[in-house]
Image (cartoon, rainbow, N blue to C red):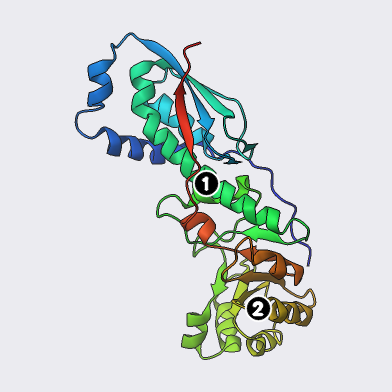
Amino acid sequence: MILNPLPILNPLPDLLLRPLVEAALLEDLGRAGDLTSDAIIPMDVRDAFVIAAREAGTIAGLDLARLAFTSVDPSVRFTTHVPDGTRVAPGDRVARIEGPARSLLTAERVALNFLGHLSGIATATATLVDAVAHTDTRVCCTRKTTPGLRAVEKYAVRAGGGVNHRFGLDDAVLVKDNHIAVAGSVSEAVKRVRAAVGHLVAIEVEVDSLDQLEELLVDPVDAVLLDNMSPETTARAVRLVAGRMVTEASGQVTPETAPALAEAGVDLVSAGWITHSAPVLDLGLDHTPE
């Protein structure tokens, strides 16, 4: 089974990003604005800062950071030093921001919150990508995302070198264990799906045993999710599938466990933690008036 080539990291449109940024700024500014900056800094003072990495990682979310600053003040000049997807070392400069000092400090936390969070996801994804780089297996995310931030978190996965699973319940079918339990069997669940969805809707079925896989292979679908199988069982499953479906391994996928699963021959390894539990990448705003 040949998968599509890795996509180019196209930027997300500002139309999609702006509501997220505006909601975050409204939350931070509250009813009275930035009391601290307004009290300390005269309105006419202009200054410059850089965003720099405090640790090694992969950058994602620069457009959100830009919008945080320019939404507070359109006169702010935001200049990137690296594009999203860049791997940085401690001390590397990521962007430079110039403009009214009040505005820069008012937007600072929202900008860094988005940038640190998404860069953390990109960095976590990159660790898995590196772990399976000696194979043809790709790293995939899940729907285990922060409510309201799915589009940007999945973008961050792509920035880290991964690929995206479905974006929601409406763009593909994934028959999971509870669906099978209610339907009574794998074959009955697949039968019901085929009768209900259109011919262009992709279908994936989760199986947790070789017996379930063999039942599925009587009427193969587009993809099979091999859930919580050992590398040895995963390799047997891949041989049984023999290229008739895309194979995805999931369950406790970490940089330590991913290589063996990839070496078993699956097309994809998927992990929820890269979006729901990735540590924030430490980035800071440093004063640089030169």
* Position of 3 relative to 188 (above/below): above
- The residue sitting at 54% across, 56% down in the picture is 274
- The residue sitting at 63% across, 78% down in the picture is 229
- The residue sitting at 33% across, 35% down in the picture is 25
Q: Is residue 93 left or right of residue 77?
A: right
Separation of disc 2 and disc 1 at Cα? Answer: 28 Å
Callout 1 amino acid: Gly
Marks 2 and 1 in Cβ contact (< 8 Å): no
Quarter containing the N terminus: bottom right
Q: Of 110 and 175, which appears nearest the observer?
A: 110
* Position of 234 relative to 65 (above/below): below
Callout 2 amino acid: Ser
Q: Secondary structure at mark 1?
A: helix
Where is residue 78 drawn, in percent x and y? Answer: 50, 22
Q: Is residue 168 left or right of residue 20?
A: right
Where is residue 76 drawn, in percent x and y? Answer: 44, 19
Q: Secondary structure at mark 2?
A: loop
User: Label 1, on which residue?
Assistant: 120
Where is residue 42 drawn, in percent x and y? Answer: 28, 11
Residue placed farthest to the top in the image? 44
User: Label 2, on which residue?
Assistant: 230
Where is residue 192 drawn, in percent x and y? Answer: 55, 82
Q: Of 198 and 36, which appears nearest the observer?
A: 36
Upstream in the sequence, badge 2 or badge 1? 1
